[in-house]
Structures are given as structure tokens and as C-alpha cells.
Amino acid sequence: MARLGRTGEGISLNDYVYATASSEEERGLRMLELRALLGKDCSYNLVRSGARVHPGRSPFMKLRLDVLLEGKRLEDIAEQVGEIRLDGATFKVQALDNDDPAEAGKFDYERKREMEREIGGRFRGRAEMRIPQREFGFVRMSGRWLLGELVRSEAAWLKHKDKPRNYSTALSVRVARAVVNIAAPSIPGMRVIDPCCGIGTVLLEAASMGIGIEGRELNPLAAIGARENLAHFGYGSAAAVTLGDMRDIRETYDAAILDMPYNLCSVLPEEEKLEMLRSARRFARKVVIVTLEELGEVVREAGFVITDRCTVNKGKFVRSVLVCE
């Protein structure tokens, strides 16, 4: 039996499928971000969730399928696509791959085109392959066929790679954006701080998503660079950057993102790392720590519990991302 929702009848099922992708080096970060945003693990390229997130938020989401129909067979959904109102809009239909080998949901080119013709021919409207006004997709998951409307990621965050100020050891845009999503999966009302903000890579990603964030930086030149980067993309008033030591912060925040300072020729003393983390424990309920060092014991001594974690490789750098509460 198929089911129909989110049509002209106004039914809302809160049922979404997200198509994701990442390099092997960032696979752990992708999975950690998806757990934060969707509350689900994603071993392969697709994840189904009741959480509604615009795919443009994540560097790993390619599109979202807003599920309208579900059936045991492809024919079950083909029989009902005519009930979807297009209101004169042109449309396109795309078969989506499922990389999970247990699903048998990855098809060759000819089979995809055959299925797309089968489904597309049942719509009551005019197909447009190049620039359709509405796009639909279908996929096989958990032994069921799902069809829905597609929402694609614009990946607007990619433009942030070309910042006026940049450091070779700064977080990449992709990592920074994912870390922001891990720290603040729910945007409304969140107060976030980056207490060692450097040139503002994290601030820029948070501000571009409408997340309330502040930056603090001990190095005056880095603070100037952060302000310049924010202003360059039009976020100069969206994220304040103050000069000072994180240990002097007295306000409280919902979350903090702490990219631990490091130097290629020296290591922070254990006492200083502990003092930094104890400060973070005082002003934030949740802290996402990015570090090149093993900090498990220091994190616990500072009063945190590590609730989730992953590693991200970039050449000789292996960063750990720790979610602490």
C-alpha cells in the first residue's frame, strides 16, 4: 500500500531523506554532523529522518527528498503520482542511488532512465529536463520505494574559501561549517562563542547561517583579520570580535567552539590547557573542541564528559573533534 502526503490536501508527514557525500578523510566528521543535525547515523550516502534541515547548511548534504509517496513496489508509487498537483509548473524526475549494498538500490544508466520514464509519464504536467520549476526524486530504502520533491544544496558557503585573510593552519571552510552545526544544530535563540576565534573562519560560517555568535581573540592581528573577513562577506555586524583572554569571559553561552591553539614548534603546557578548558566549562554548557592532541584526561579533569567524537585528516594533520558537556 502506498501513502500520499504533502500534496494539495495539506498533509505533513515530516519525512525526509538526505543524500550525503564526503571524502574518506572527512567521513567521521560527516557522520558526527548528521548525528547532531538529524539524530541519525549514516553509514552510506542516504539517511532518513523526521528532522527538517535545509541541505545548504551542511557541507556534506547534497539534497533533501521531501517524501510524498511510499510503497512496496515502484508501481505502487507510479500509480499515485498523478495525484500530486503541479499547478502548471514544469517538472523533472530523477532516480537516486542508494550506496548500501543490502538495498540493491544502485542502478545502471539504462535502468535509471527506464524508471524515470515510467514515473515521469504518470505526472499530469509538462516535463522539462534542463531548468524545471519543480524536481522530484525516487529511491529504494529499507525494501521500500519512496518518492518526493527535491530540495538541492546551493553550497553558498564555498565562496568563503576566498577570504581576504587566511592562515595555512586555519580550519577549512568545510570543517568549520560542520563544527558549527555540531555545536548549534538548532538555530533559533542559540548564543555561541568562539573564544579563540583566530581569523574568524568559524564566526563566518555561523553568521552566514543566522546563528548568534561572538568571537574573542588574544592576538590583535588575528582579531583584525577576523573583522576584515566578516566585513568582506557582509557579516561585520553579525558577529562581534573582542580582544582578550578567554579566561576573562564572564557571560554565559549555550555553546562554545574551541579550536585549541597550537604551534608547530612547541606544545601548550598541561596547566594552561586545563585552565582554558575550566574557563570554557564555566561560560558554556556545551563545548565542541578541535584539537591536534589527545585531551581526554584534561577534558575530564576540567569537568566535562565527552558525549561524541571523530577525527578529521588533512595531510599530516589529524584533528580530533570532541563534543563535551
Image (cartoon, helix red, strand yellow):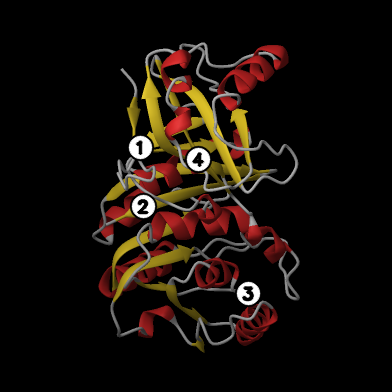
Give the mark nearest the N terminus, 2 or 1.
1
> How many angstroms separate mark 3 from mark 2 (CA)?
22 Å
**Nearer the N terminus, badge 4 or badge 1?**
1
Q: Dot 1 lies on which element?
A: loop
Of circles 4 and 2, which is in front?
A: 4
Q: Residue at x 54, y 67 (%)?
A: 202
Nearer the observer, disc 4 or disc 3? 4
In space, the residues marked 4 and 3 are separated at their CA atoms by 39 Å
Confirm whether residue 264 shows in the render.
no
Q: Quadrant of residue 167?
A: bottom right
Helix, strand or loop for disc 2: strand
Q: Residues within 10 Å of mark 2 (few under 14, many from 20)?
A: many
Which of the two marks, 4 or 1, is nearer to us in this view? 4
The residue identified by callout 2 is 323
Q: Which residue is mark 4?
A: 149
Residue at coordinates 34% horizontally, 46% vertically from top-left? 51
Residue 299: percent from left, percent from top: 33, 56
Q: Earlier in the sequence, mark 4 or mark 3?
A: 4
State the quadrant of the C terminus. bottom left
Q: Which residue is mark 1?
A: 40
Which amino acid is tagged 4?
A: Glu
Q: Secondary structure at mark 4?
A: strand
Give the percent coordinates (x, y) of residue 86.
52, 44
Q: For numbered disc 3, what is the local secondary structure? A: loop
* Left or right, residue 317 beside residue 253: right
Report which residue position mark 3 lands on.
Answer: 199
Disc 4 from disc 2: Cα separation: 34 Å
Side (left or right) of 218 relative to 276: right
Query: Is residue 105 at all visible to an observer of this figure?
Result: yes
